[in-house]
Amino acid sequence: MGEVCSHLSEEERQVIRIEIGNGTSVRGIGLMPGRNASTAGGEIRRNTWLPSNENESYRPCRPKRLKTGPWTGGYYIAGPARRRADRRRARSRRRHRPSCGRPWARAAEWPGRGWSPPPVGGRPRVLFPDDPTMRVRPESVCRWIHADRHHRERRARCLPRGSRRRRGRGGGRTSRFPIPGRAPISGRPPEAGDRSGFGHWEADGVIGAGCNPHTEVERKTRFLMAGIVPGRTAGESVGARLAMFSPLPAGARGGVTHDNGTGFARHTRLRDGPGMDTCFADPYSSRRRGSNENGNGMIRRYPPERSEIRMDMAGELREIVDEADNRPMRVPDYRTPAEAFADELLELQDQQGVLHL
């Protein structure tokens, strides 16, 4: 029989066929050739031939009252099973490239300008609306960038948030401990959810080597604030946040939405001190704090990858934040976040003056 890490051989498939005819269980079939039971089970499930599905167009329904028979029965044959496995293996290793050289040249040029894969795939639809050959999928661009290991690092560096290795879409799964006094995001006020109210923030920490920058983004104006936390404890994090919120008026610090990181375990100090409402997004749902994630991405463009963050880099971080806050954005009618934030503060000051009168 073959080695453990090799594909199933013709002899092993013949053994599987014979044992299926003898009525042996899947676990027993997996033990006889020296394989795992899941290997034998997957082979039988993928390569079983159904007479009613000869053209592989559908898989018939098998009700409880009709489990076997010439129409619903399945047959495992070693030769067709090997050919089906070879076809699947050939399809999985096929390179994803555009159908002709013109879109391939465009797809190779635009990432060098800092374009991400979605604009690279969508821009040809605008430039060449009547040419169906000028079509490139964003997934094809990503696979081309990471296909050649010799050029992978150079190509991935052109992307705004590129990495030498592609991570799974699900992301990492880490264990979480219960945060004391945690309030879910469903309890957030409606004006904070639809961004109509001013003074609601999103918080996150940018973990890196050395010290960690902490960011706060106001949801309505997209105004970004950032500070460097000397350590990774919850006490140091909330201390830096209190220093960031203390200069603001009471109307500009209504509430804040966190992720479920351990650095926000002392969030109750924001309730007791500045009187801010605190809530937490659902686990693994960073889209509920999209403005903050976007702000973190802008900060990560400037420091070199794997660079150490030190406390004496506060001035450099301040320059990065100022540049981000003074960049026009589409959402606040192409004003800068700093201008929108200043307008909200003036309006808040006028409202407080009217109330005092």
Image (cartoon, rainbow, N blue to C red):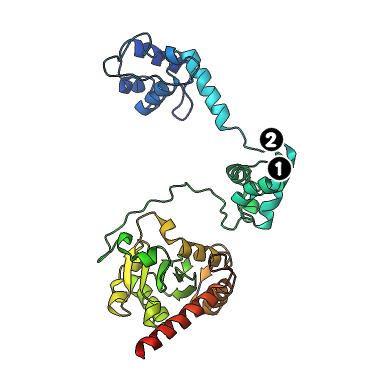
Taking 8 as reference, is 98 left or right? right
Residue at figure coordinates x 71%, y 44% from the top left: 128
Q: Quadrant of the C terminus?
A: bottom left
Tell me residue 286's x, y (percent): 42, 57
Identify the element where label 1 is drawn. helix
- Secondary structure found at label 2: loop
Front-most of residues 37 and 61: 61
Number of on-image labels: 2
Residue 49, by quadrant, is top left
Q: Residue furthest top?
A: 70
User: Residue drawn 30% across and 63% down?
Assistant: 187
- Quadrant where the N terminus sits is top left
Q: Amino acid at mark 2?
A: Ser
Q: Label 2: which residue?
A: 99
Cα distance in 3D space between marks 1 and 2:
8 Å
Which residue is depicted at the point 30% across and 19% down? 63
Give the amino acid type for the residue marked by disc 1 in the picture: Pro
| Residue 303 drawn at (x, y percent) | 57, 67
Q: Quadrant of residue 218?
A: bottom left
Residue designated by label 1: 103
Identify whether 135 is placed above or below 184: above
In the rendered image, the vertical position of residue 239 relative to residue 157, given as above or below: below
